[in-house]
């Protein structure tokens, strides 16, 4: 079985709630750097543990690109698939916020709220 | 009416090689429905470990290692990925039967004879060898594992553009020139199999190919976990630059843009490129 994030209790994080109010946003979750899911809000994803692990890997690999290109640091990762988008952003030094939305969602607004969350520390586990 | 394997959750389609599929499904449990020429088949995968292979062309059935070899012989196979729960996976394994299952890689692989050259859908067995994992010939009463496929095609994935990773040779060079003239674009390249195929702009992008391919591996893991449809593009936004990776023909585009270019402009540019590539 995959890790489903036992501590992924829907704890109130105001910016996650704000993101979820944007039309087309399905899920938002906050991940600690150890891969554990701090909180998840919105539509439940069946394998949130797998998604958090992949999101952290993407942050790490994007950091490698940032190092090679010397234009860092990383600001945001945007994955666009045909039916959904996944946006990932580092929060402080301690974790990552990820948002899953429809491709027609307002990406600018989502980015704005993710940046706001990025200015807050990740809650302790 | 014959039984069908569970439909699972369709997560996307892709056209690529067996090696590529197997190396990009380490966190995927489910069925990969395969089309080769006029035949159809499937691969059952449990988190990176291929568990069963099955292929049918008309009344001819090929299974197990022989089916794996058949798939491996084709440079491109059309694949449709369907994520399974543990229960669905066990059900599918039971339905395909022991003949389709394959041993853990490395245990018995060396004993499997090669297929005949010009294989049309069946194999020749080496004399005196039993075939626990293979089956060739007519199986008129075999379950139809694919009868649900038309149902899945209508489940939100109809018309989904496949992510193409073929090995064609035609690269419209003017597409690179066109991208480079887009405001805010500083460099653009096409890479394939770890190397730059062609590029425009001042910057040397060779050093970005390896980490870009690592990024793509993780992107495919995400694709396997979400019901997303095929990849359109990935953009990594750095403080001083945007790096965009997008499938294009037989490889991937790598585009560097200035930080003033926003995501909307990048998305429009990549959509225009996709349209031009499809034309």
Image: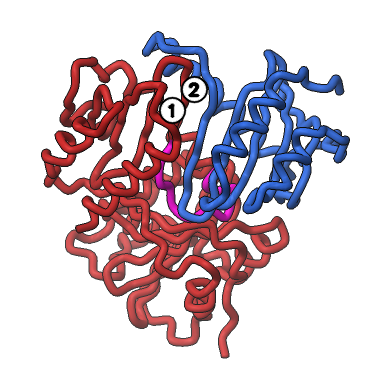
Chain colours: A blue, B red
Residue B3, image quadrant: bottom right
Residue extent of the magenta highlight: B222-234
Compared with residue B201, is residue A6 higher up or lower down, i.e. above or below?
below
**Residue bearing mark 1:** B214
Residue B85, image quadrant: bottom right
Quadrant in which the N terminus of chain B is drawn = bottom right
Residue A32, image quadrant: top right
B148 or A43: nearer the eye?
A43
SS at mark 2 in the image: helix
Residue drawn at x 70%, y 56% as measured from the top left: B86
Mark 2 packing: few (<14 Cα in 10 Å), some, or many (20+)? many
B8 or A114: nearer the eye?
A114
Query: In 3D space, how far apart are the residues under numbered discs 1 and 2 (Cα atoms)?
Result: 7 Å
Q: Are marks 1 and 2 on the same chain?
A: no
In-image side of B78 versus B202 (left or right): right
**Badge 2: chain ID:** A
**Residue A21 lies within the magenta run:** no
Identify the disc placed on residue A61.
Answer: 2
Compared with residue A98, is residue B5 higher up or lower down, i.e. above or below?
below
């Amino acid at each position: 079985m995959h890790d489903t994030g036992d501590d992924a209790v829907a704890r109130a994080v105001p910016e996650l709630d704000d993101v979820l109010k944007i039309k087309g946003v399905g899920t938002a979750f906050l991940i600690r750097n150890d891969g554990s899911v701090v909180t998840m809000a919105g539509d439940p994803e069946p394998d949130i543990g797998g998604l958090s692990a992949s999101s952290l890997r993407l942050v790490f690999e994007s950091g490698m690109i940032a190092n090679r290109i010397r234009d860092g640091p990383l600001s945001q990762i945007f994955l666009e698939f045909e039916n959904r988008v996944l946006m990932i952003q580092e929060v402080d030094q301690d974790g990552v916020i990820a948002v899953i939305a429809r491709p027609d969602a307002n990406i600018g607004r989502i980015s704005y709220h993710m940046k706001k969350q990025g200015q807050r520390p990740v809650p302790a586990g | 009416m014959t039984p069908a394997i569970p439909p699972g959750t369709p997560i996307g389609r892709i056209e690529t090689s067996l090696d590529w599929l197997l190396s990009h499904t380490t966190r995927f449990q489910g069925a990969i429905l395969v089309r080769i020429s006029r035949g159809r088949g499937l691969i059952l995968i449990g988190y990176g470990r291929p568990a069963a292979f099955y292929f049918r062309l008309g009344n001819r059935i090929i299974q197990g290692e022989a089916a794996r070899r058949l798939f491996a012989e084709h440079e491109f196979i059309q694949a449709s990925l369907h994520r399974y729960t543990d229960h669905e996976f066990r059900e599918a394994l039971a339905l395909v039967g022991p003949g389709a299952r394959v041993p853990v890689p490395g245990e018995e692989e060396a004993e499997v004879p090669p297929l005949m050259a010009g294989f049309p859908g069946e194999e020749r067995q080496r004399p005196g060898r039993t075939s626990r994992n293979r089956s060739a010939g007519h199986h008129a009463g075999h379950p139809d594992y694919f009868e649900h496929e038309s149902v899945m095609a209508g489940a939100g994935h109809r018309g989904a553009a496949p992510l193409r990773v073929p090995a064609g040779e035609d690269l419209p060079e003017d597409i690179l020139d066109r991208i480079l003239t887009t405001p805010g674009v500083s460099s653009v390249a096409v890479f394939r199999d770890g190397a730059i195929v062609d590029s425009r702009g001042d910057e040397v992008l060779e050093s970005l190919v390896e980490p870009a391919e690592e990024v793509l591996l993780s992107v495919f893991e995400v694709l396997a976990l979400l019901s997303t449809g095929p990849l359109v593009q990935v953009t990594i936004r750095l403080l001083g630059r945007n790096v965009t990776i997008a499938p294009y023909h037989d490889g991937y585009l790598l585009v560097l843009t200035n930080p003033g270019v926003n995501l909307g402009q990048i998305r429009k540019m990549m959509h225009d490129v996709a349209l031009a590539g499809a034309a």
